[in-house]
Image (cartoon, rainbow, N blue to C red):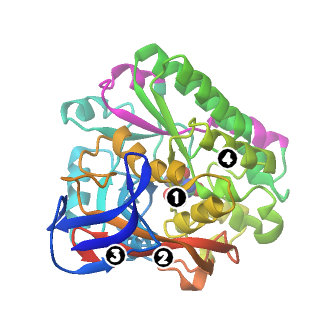
């Protein structure tokens, strides 16, 4: 296959050239089917390092086929699936079973997280696991951790600890202060302090014990500032944020009520704007979707019974490209946040670049293609989006994954 005449992303910039694919690899020359990419941008298949593709008793929300289709629709060719399944993935055995079941349904490449807790650290160390998920604050699913410091101390130092950072004690205090009838209750309970208190403690652990720490879905300015400073001190910390923290804020409750519930909670407009600054100055390494589908029926329930989470795997790229068109970030600065950066953090040796020998995961982007986000048109099983009605400019038009073209 030859992808002809596009602007190809190579060594952090775009160059006009042809790209050759043979079998499952990028090669230096080939013949065969020609795909015209003139006027388009040719980038590595995107890596979304935080999704929840459900299945296993929650297939009414999503399964690995619908999740994959949604990912492909959004230019994503590799996903990292979270371990908060109905039966949480807390052992090597459960991880292997999940991998077996998922393999036959997945249309995209994938990695699976194991959930770390105080009792499975030794098993994780013994099984040469490369990365784990740590639920520092309580969220959807059964994933309690008693003593995070103990985990940081005992876990192998080459394991990347991906953390959901919200402090349960701060949230408990806030629950006493506010009434559940408040429209923005969820954001009042899961406030900036809930997140940055956790971030502070986690950075402290990583600094003391020398771990590789990755804070996922950073949602507020204080957390980002702490991470920036920790990086300066040489702490091995990386982080990501998601489109809902970059494009939405706590004014969303006025529009869609409880449906705006997500963990961490949406923050203020000021936080939203600040995150763009930290994305551009390199503090925020990656962008991911935290695709966490729940049905509209579930999301329309009253506060206590409404689950937290938004679908987002297929809206991430069009939204980010819209931001590129609006001048909020350069295309060559955004692309690494879903390609080279996650590949480097998680040690994916064949992903994230279009160099010879890398996997032939390629996305062709049309920066001009206009659209509007509409839940009905999405591939995810839950036909709604918190970004409903937003106009977009830019999307993937072709996805090639190991010589299949979508
Ligand atoms: C996630 C879910 O629904 O699984 N929900 C969410 O609000 N993000 C859990 C999580 O990632 O915290
Ligand atoms: Zn999540």
Taking the spot 80% from the left edge, 45% from the top edge, the residue there is 270
Mark sitting on residue 3: none
Q: Compared with residue 5, is residue 238 higher up or lower down, i.e. above or below?
A: above
Measure the C-alpha gap from mark 3 to mark 4: 33 Å
**Secondary element at image label 1:** loop
Q: Quadrant of residue 389?
A: bottom right
Measure the C-alpha gap from mark 2 to mark 3: 9 Å
Measure the C-alpha gap from mark 4 to mark 2: 27 Å
Measure the C-alpha gap from mark 4 to mark 1: 16 Å
Q: Which residue is mark 1?
A: 289
Q: Tag 3 or tag 1, which sits nearer the N-term?
A: 3
Q: Is mark 1 within 8 Å of ligand 2?
A: no
Q: Is residue 46 left or right of residue 359?
A: right
**Secondary element at image label 2:** loop
**Crowdedness near tag 4: few (<14), some (14–19) or many (≥20) residues, C-alpha within 10 Å:** some
Q: Which residue is mark 4?
A: 276
**Secondary element at image label 3:** helix
Q: Is mark 3 within 8 Å of ligand 1?
A: no
Mark sitting on residue 380: 2
């Amino acid at each position: 296959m030859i992808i002809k005449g596009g602007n190809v992303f190579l060594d952090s910039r775009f160059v006009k050239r042809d790209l050759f694919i043979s079998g499952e690899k990028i090669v230096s020359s080939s013949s065969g089917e020609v795909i015209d990419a003139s006027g388009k941008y040719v980038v590595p298949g995107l890596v979304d390092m935080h999704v929840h593709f459900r299945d296993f008793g929650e297939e009414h929300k999503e399964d690995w086929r619908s999740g994959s289709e949604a990912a492909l629709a959004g230019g994503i060719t590799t996903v990292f699936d979270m371990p908060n399944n109905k039966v949480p993935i807390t052992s090597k055995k459960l991880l292997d079973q999940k991998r077996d079941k998922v393999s036959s349904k997945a249309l995209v490449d994938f990695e699976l997280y194991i959930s770390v807790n105080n009792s499975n650290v030794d098993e994780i160390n013994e099984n040469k696991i490369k990365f784990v998920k740590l639920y520092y604050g309580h969220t959807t699913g059964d994933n309690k951790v008693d003593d995070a410091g103990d985990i940081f101390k005992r876990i192998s130092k080459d394991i990347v600890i991906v953390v959901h950072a919200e402090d349960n004690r701060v949230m408990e205090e806030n629950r006493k202060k506010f009434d559940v009838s408040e429209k923005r209750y969820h954001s009042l309970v899961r406030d900036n302090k809930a997140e940055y208190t956790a971030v502070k403690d986690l950075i402290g652990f990583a600094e003391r014990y020398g771990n590789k720490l990755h804070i996922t879905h950073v949602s507020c300015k204080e957390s980002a500032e702490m991470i920036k400073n920790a990086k300066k001190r040489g702490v091995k910390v990386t982080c990501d944020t998601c489109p809902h923290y970059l494009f939405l804020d706590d004014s969303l409750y006025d529009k869609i009520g409880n449906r705006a519930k997500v963990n961490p909670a949406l923050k203020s407009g000021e936080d939203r704007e600040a995150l763009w600054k930290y994305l551009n100055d390199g503090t925020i390494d990656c962008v991911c979707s935290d695709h966490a589908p729940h049905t509209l029926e579930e999301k329309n329930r009253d506060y206590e019974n409404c689950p937290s989470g938004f679908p987002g795997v297929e809206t991430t790229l069009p939204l980010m490209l819209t931001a590129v068109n609006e001048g909020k970030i350069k295309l060559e600065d955004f692309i690494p946040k879903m390609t080279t950066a996650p590949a480097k953090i998680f040690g994916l040796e064949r992903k994230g670049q279009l160099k010879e020998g890398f996997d032939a995961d390629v996305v062709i982007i049309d920066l001009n293609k206009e659209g509007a986000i509409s839940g009905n048109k999405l591939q995810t099983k839950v036909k709604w989006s918190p970004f409903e009605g937003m106009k977009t400019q830019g999307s993937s038009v072709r996805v090639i994954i190991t010589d299949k073209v979508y």
